[in-house]
Image (spheres, rainbow, N blue to C red):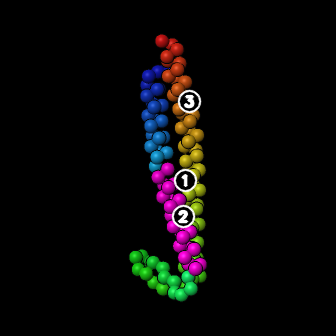
Amino acid sequence: MSKEQLEKLTADYQGLQEQLQSLAIQKAQFTEQKEELKGAMDEIEKAKGKVYSTIGGVMVETTKEEASKNVKERQDSVDMRLSIINKQYEDAVKKEKTLRAEIENLVKGERAAK
């Protein structure tokens, strides 16, 4: 394999590393959101009096059921996004391992040829 091919594989590998970092950050953010929503749901369930919800930066009184429904919808959305991110991350990790092995084999082959 030529030097140009090795450079291309290395650039692809670096791009993949950046993608993995981005996905890891997104994964952490969605996981944090999931925990926050779980805490919000716990607080709604414990609430005995009035319940408030924020809409566009404004806090309004709402029913416990409506607040619970809104949080559940947000939880479902976060779960779906997290599932997608996890799948993308797993695919990128597999691709990264394959690409790394390909680069290592190429480098070993060039060393053996010298």
Q: Secondary structure at mark 1?
A: helix
Between the residue at mark 1 and the residue at mark 2, the CA separation in whole angstroms equals 13 Å
Q: Residue furthest top?
A: 114
Q: Which residue is mark 2?
A: 34
Foreground residue, 35 or 101? 35
Q: Residue at x 54, y 33 (%)?
A: 99
Q: Residue at x 52, y 26 (%)?
A: 104
Q: Secondary structure at mark 3?
A: helix
Q: For the image shown, how many numbered marks are present on the structure?
A: 3
Which of the two marks, 1 or 2, is nearer to us in this view? 2
Q: Residues within 10 Å of mark 3 (few under 14, many from 20)?
A: few
Q: Magenta segment, which residues?
A: 24-46
Q: Secondary structure at mark 2?
A: helix
Q: Residue at x 58, y 40 (%)?
A: 94
Between the residue at mark 2 and the residue at mark 3, the CA separation in whole angstroms equals 35 Å
Compared to residue 107, the image places residue 95 above or below, namely below
Give the residue type at disc 1. Answer: Ile
Q: Which residue is mark 1?
A: 85
Q: Which residue is mark 3?
A: 101
Q: Residue furthest left?
A: 57
Give the residue type at disc 2. Answer: Lys
Q: In screen coordinates, is 74 left or right of 55? A: right
Q: Are marks 1 and 2 in contact (CB under 8 Å)?
A: no
Q: Residue at x 40, y 76 (%)?
A: 57
